[in-house]
Amino acid sequence: MSEPMIAAAAGLPLLVGWSVHALRLRRRIEAARRDPLTGLWTRSAFEERAREQLSRPRSVVYLLDLNRFKEVNDTHGHAAGDTVIRATGERLAEWAYINDATVGRLGGDEFAAVAYHRSRTELEWALAELTHALTQPIDIGGLHVAVGASIGVVDVDPRAGVVDLSQVLRCADEQMYAAKRAGIPWQLTDDLTPQCATVTGRRGGRLGSTGGTEAAA
């Protein structure tokens, strides 16, 4: 065996070791950007990917929270609440796969998604599909509970140019709250102008703002 071949053979275990180490490191970084309960993107990871996706024309932003989550937690305990969140994450992940969407868990029972739709008809079909998935009963220790969700949707006009994700999410939040107040599954807008006052960086009346009075989810 020539000297170069001997040197290469000697260095092979080291190269393999570094490759395995790099793979493990990438997996750890990836895991840190995933919500441990649902496997969806965390808020920061979602926002990073959502900003990229918003650069495409005809992007649509969804913001949703569950309607009876607090009731489930109060009645059946936090383990039951975790079951609901986990099931919701699975349903959102499946919907995202079908619709080529980016989905994340923003915290608690609040989730967001960004997708691309070629037409309003396609968007409404995706919304009907999402609503159907989220209203299916969830098995909590043999008890089947229907939770459901309120969804706020912003259809970003392709003529809008570069849009700010935080502004779009705020508008989606307003639509979500309007849907919840009206008792309807979702509400849609293409207007990027926020309608509600901001209190401490959040929609006035939303939990977390001064004097927040938002209806229980």
Image (cartoon, rainbow, N blue to C red):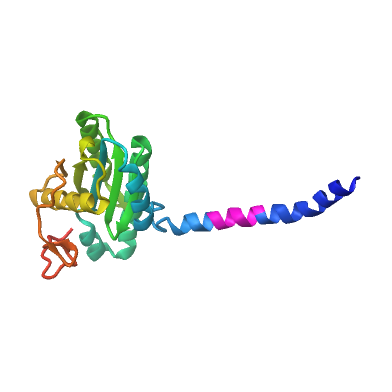
- Can you give x and y, in whole percent of width and height, for residue 43 in the image? 34, 57
Residue at left 52%, top 58%? 28
Whether residue 182 appears in this view of the structure is: yes
Q: Which one is nearer the viewer's eye here, 160 or 65?
A: 160
- Specify the quadrant of the image occupied by residue 203: bottom left
In which quadrant is the N terminus drawn? top right
Q: Is residue 118 left or right of residue 46?
A: left
Q: Main secondary structure of the magenta part?
A: helix
In which quadrant is the C terminus drawn? bottom left
Q: Which one is nearer the viewer's eye here, 56 or 44?
A: 56
| Span colored in magenta | 19-26
Query: Up-down: is 200 above or below 99?
Result: below
Residue at left 14%, top 48%? 175
Residue at left 27%, top 33%? 117
Number of numbered discs present?
Answer: 0
- Can you give x and y, in whole percent of width and height, for residue 214 in the image? 12, 61
Q: Which one is nearer the viewer's eye here, 160 or 100?
A: 160
- Can you give x and y, in whole percent of width and height, for residue 105 in the image? 33, 54
Query: Up-down: is 167 above or below 95?
Result: below
- Can you give x and y, in whole percent of width and height, for residue 138 in the image? 30, 49
Q: Residue furthest right?
A: 1
Whether residue 142 appears in this view of the structure is: no
Residue 22 among those drawn in magenta: yes
